[in-house]
Image: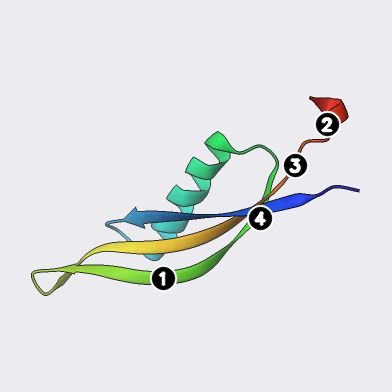
Amino acid sequence: MPVARVTEISATSPNSFDDAVATGIERACKTLRNVEGAWVKDMNVMIENNAVKAYKVNLCITFVLDDSDQL
């Protein structure tokens, strides 16, 4: 039976929350194997000079751990 782990990451984008999510997932998949899903834990914006500078998301990434006999 597979066992999964959840790790939390933050990602930002100057364009949108959707872009920040896509950026975070793309980066996580470069480092983690067996990524199965993600959920947005938190969203906020960074403000500079009375305007939105960036969109930030905190993502929880779920990935399945490798079995020891497959290593």
The residue sitting at 75% across, 51% down in the picture is 4
Left or right of residue 15, residue 58 in this image: right
Calculate the distance from the C-alpha at mark 3 to the C-alpha at mark 4.
13 Å
Q: Position of 70 compared to 49: left or right? A: right
Mark 2 vs 3: CB contact within 8 A: no
In the image, is 18 to the left or to the right of 47? right
Q: Earlier in the sequence, mark 4 or mark 2?
A: 4
Give the mark nearest the N terminus, 3 or 4.
4
**Figure check: 28 above or below 54:** above
In this figure, which residue is indicated by the disc labeled 3? 65
Q: For mark 3, give the secondary structure.
A: loop
In this figure, which colouring scheme has been used for the structure? rainbow
State the CA–CA distance, disc 3 to disc 1.
27 Å
Q: Residue furthest front?
A: 68
Measuring from the top left, give residue 30's x and y in whole percent: 54, 35
- Which residue matches tag 1? 43
Against 60, residue 44 (above or below) is below
Question: Residue 64: x, y in percent?
Answer: 74, 45
Label 2 or label 1, whichever comes before in sequence order: 1
Of the numbered discs in the image, which one, if any, rests on residue 37?
4
**Residue pictured at 46% horizontal, 62% vertical:** 58
Q: Distance between the Cα atoms at labels 2 and 3?
A: 9 Å
- Dot 2 falls on a residue whose secondary structure is helix
Q: Crowding near pointer 2: few (<14 within 10 Å), some, many (20+)?
A: few
Q: Which residue is mark 2?
A: 68
